[in-house]
Image (cartoon, rainbow, N blue to C red):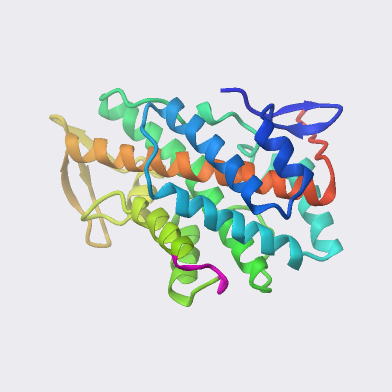
């Protein structure tokens, strides 16, 4: 997949949708089109078919970013630009990496699938949910620190659940709220174990593999043995969530670029 290049024009995607989205950051349709283009490419890279419910989520993302730009004052924009251009190296080193670093088709080997799931949760799902929550809070006129992303999904999922329960941001229409609910439903990887519990076990390498199954020593009610089929379903849902959230990253970067100018990204020496 062709992804960001870093030349004289700053960080940019080599797609027509990127140019249209950055020319007018207030154009929600252009932002949605960029998200859809990224989503199709991500799904193709992951070996998955696009899902119908994704459209509502991408529309919600664009609406959130539209209002976020209106609420950011000059100091917050400068802070955000510093983070995206330089600070990212310390706080989220995966920010500018290619989607293929976390998106690859399922193969069936449980060890590989568990490692891939952990990689996707830590480098795409958790960080982008946190970015989405930050954007939603900002769009609602609320302040949330632009601090280092906590490893894992517990805090980001808690923030997403809070947004859904409290109706944050309040301007989303019914279709967009269904899109956000679609995003959340895809993040329920298991019927027994919470995603937070699974993510923590994966990060701690606390799973036991034996005779084609996986044992989780769950402390929150999700403990027990899981079949290989269940593990593959975790991975499939995690992969789908990555395919939906990586486009949000592209939409976010386009919004900031369009509103404040090209991003001159610094990489480690």
Does the magenta run of residues contain 39? no
Q: Is residue 209 above or below residue 141?
A: above
Residue 153 picture location, percent across and down? 45, 53
Between 227 and 1, the one nearer to me in the picture:
1
Q: Which residue is depicted at the point 64% across and 53% down?
A: 28
Q: From what the image shows, is residue 174 above or below residue 215?
A: below
Location of residue 85 by image quarter: top right
Q: Quadrant of residue 118?
A: top left
Q: Quadrant of the N terminus?
A: top right
What secondary structure characterizes most of the magenta part?
loop
Residue in front for this viewpoint, 184 or 17:
17
Residue drawn at (86%, 62%), measured in percent from left and top?
A: 74
Residue 67 left/right relative to 189: right
Residue 256 in view here: yes
Q: Is residue 60 left or right of residue 221?
A: right
> Magenta region: which residues?
169-174
Q: Does residue 171 belong to the magenta stretch?
A: yes
**Residue 15 coordinates in the image, percent (x, y):** 66, 29
Q: Is residue 96 left or right of residue 268?
A: left
Residue at 21% across, 55% down: 192
Quadrant assignment for the C terminus: top right
């Amino acid at each position: 997949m062709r992804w960001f290049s870093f030349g004289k024009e700053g960080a940019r995607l080599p797609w027509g949708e990127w140019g249209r989205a950055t020319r007018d950051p207030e154009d929600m349709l252009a932002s949605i089109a960029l998200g859809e283009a990224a989503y199709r490419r991500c799904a193709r890279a992951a070996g998955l078919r696009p899902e119908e419910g994704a459209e509502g989520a991408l529309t919600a993302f664009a609406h959130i970013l539209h209002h976020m730009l209106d609420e950011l004052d000059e100091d917050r924009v400068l802070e955000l630009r510093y983070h995206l251009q330089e600070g990212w190296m310390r706080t989220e080193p995966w920010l500018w990496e290619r989607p293929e670093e976390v998106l690859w088709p399922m193969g069936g080997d449980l060890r590989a699938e568990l490692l891939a799931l952990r990689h996707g949760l830590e480098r795409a799902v958790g960080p982008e949910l946190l970015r989405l929550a930050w954007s939603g809070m900002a769009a609602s006129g609320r302040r949330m620190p632009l601090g280092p992303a906590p490893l894992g999904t517990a805090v980001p999922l808690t923030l997403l659940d809070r947004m859904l329960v409290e109706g944050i941001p309040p301007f989303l229409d019914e279709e967009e709220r269904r899109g956000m609910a679609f995003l959340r439903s895809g993040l329920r990887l298991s019927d027994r174990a919470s995603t937070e519990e699974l993510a923590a076990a994966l990060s701690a390498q606390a799973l036991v593999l034996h005779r084609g199954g996986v044992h989780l020593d769950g402390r929150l009610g999700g403990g027990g043995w899981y079949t290989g089929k269940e593990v593959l379903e975790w991975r499939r849902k995690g992969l789908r969530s990555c395919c939906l959230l990586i486009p949000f990253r592209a939409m976010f970067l386009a919004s900031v670029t369009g509103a404040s100018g090209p991003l001159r990204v610094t990489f480690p020496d």
